[in-house]
Amino acid sequence: MSEGDLTVMKPETMKSYIWLQTADGSIQQVEQEVAMFCPMICQEVIQKGVGSSKNHAISLPQRVNPAMFSLILDYCRFHQLPGRSNKERKTYDERFIRMDTKRLCELTSAADSLQLKPLVDLTSRALARIIEGKTPEEIREIFHLPDDLTEEEKLEPLKNTMDDPRIRLLNRLYAKKRKELKERERLKNVEVEEHVDERSVDDLLSFINGRDPKVVKMSKGKKKKKKKKDQKIVSSNDIHDKESHDLYSKQQCVEETGSSMREVPNLPSAEDDISTPKAGSEDEDIDDEIDPAMRELLDR
């Protein structure tokens, strides 16, 4: 091989780097082969010609923090090398995603920002295995999600860009639930329309006037009870007054009878007539010349 060929090959064998800036503002130098494995970085280098120097570093998306970017670079360094078998790649991937749920979610978001689809699929499958068979409440607890959705929003169909049969089945179940919910709402509206107002006219007038019909009924009942009680008291008072009047009348009659008896003049008894004859009668007897025998009897 000539020296000219060596001079031509020497620049190609030299390792080149790309300057990248993460969300916290730190700038680091990454091998070009590794960085270009991410489609987003590859587009920035090709289309805009940035990343060749520290002053023209490529700004990474906000969701790519230094910790997640370090994991992404490890993934890219392993998979960008040719000659890896599928078994080796699968074993590496299984070890790579052994992390807690929070970091797995952050890694998925960062990989999606860099358009690194193989890593997004890997982390998404791992998350799917975590939530498989869990209820919505358990899923919200795992990912610390607030329950701020209405019942209709919870039943919205999911996007199925990959034509996943599990998502199709879930959307069918959601459609069935939505239909049942609409039917319940329809029956509820029909019951409200068919409801007949059984209140009386007095209750309706009380409601219009701003009074409670129950309070009005209670007040009417109290008034009736009070009226009956007053009638009982009046009747008892009448009876008592009548009895008192009768007693008073009897007492007055007795008093009048006594006073009339006291006003009758004392009549002379027979003995008084015999023993104490009046002077006028004696003169009359003398004038009539009473028999002396009779006079003697009268004197006795």
Image (cartoon, rainbow, N blue to C red):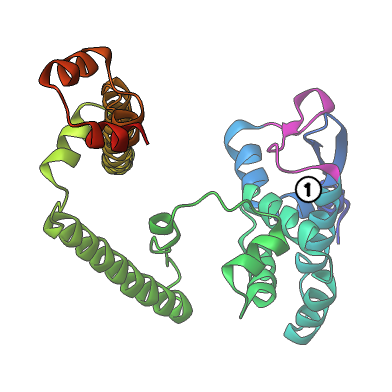
Nearer-the-camera pick, 29 or 143: 143
Q: Residue at x 32, y 71 (%)?
A: 175
Residue 265 vs 239, above or below: the answer is above
Residue for badge 1: 32
Which region of the structure is painted magenta? 50-66
Confirm whether residue 185 shows in the render: yes
> Is residue 262 one of those drawn in magenta?
no
Residue 117 spot, x, y in % from top left: 61, 61
Q: Secondary structure at mark 1?
A: helix
Residue 255 vs 281, above or below: the answer is below
Residue 237 vs 143, above or below: the answer is above
> Is residue 63 one of those drawn in magenta?
yes
Figure label count: 1
Kind of residue sitting beneath label 1? Gln
| Outermost residue toward the front in this view | 292
Confirm whether residue 226 shows in the render: no
Residue 177 spot, x, y in % from top left: 35, 71
Nearer-the-camera pick, 160 or 260: 260
Left or right placement of residue 270 versus residue 204 in this view = right
User: Magenta segment, principal secondary structure?
Assistant: loop
Nearer-the-camera pick, 69 or 220: 220
Q: Residue at x 63, y 53 (%)?
A: 112
Left or right placement of residue 1 versus residue 83 in this view = right
Nearer-the-camera pick, 255 or 209: 255
Q: Quadrant of residue 263?
A: top left
Q: Which quadrant would the N terminus be assigned to in this image?
A: bottom right
Q: Residue at x 70, y 36 (%)?
A: 62
Residue 147 vs 59, above or below: the answer is below
Q: Quadrant of residue 142?
A: bottom right
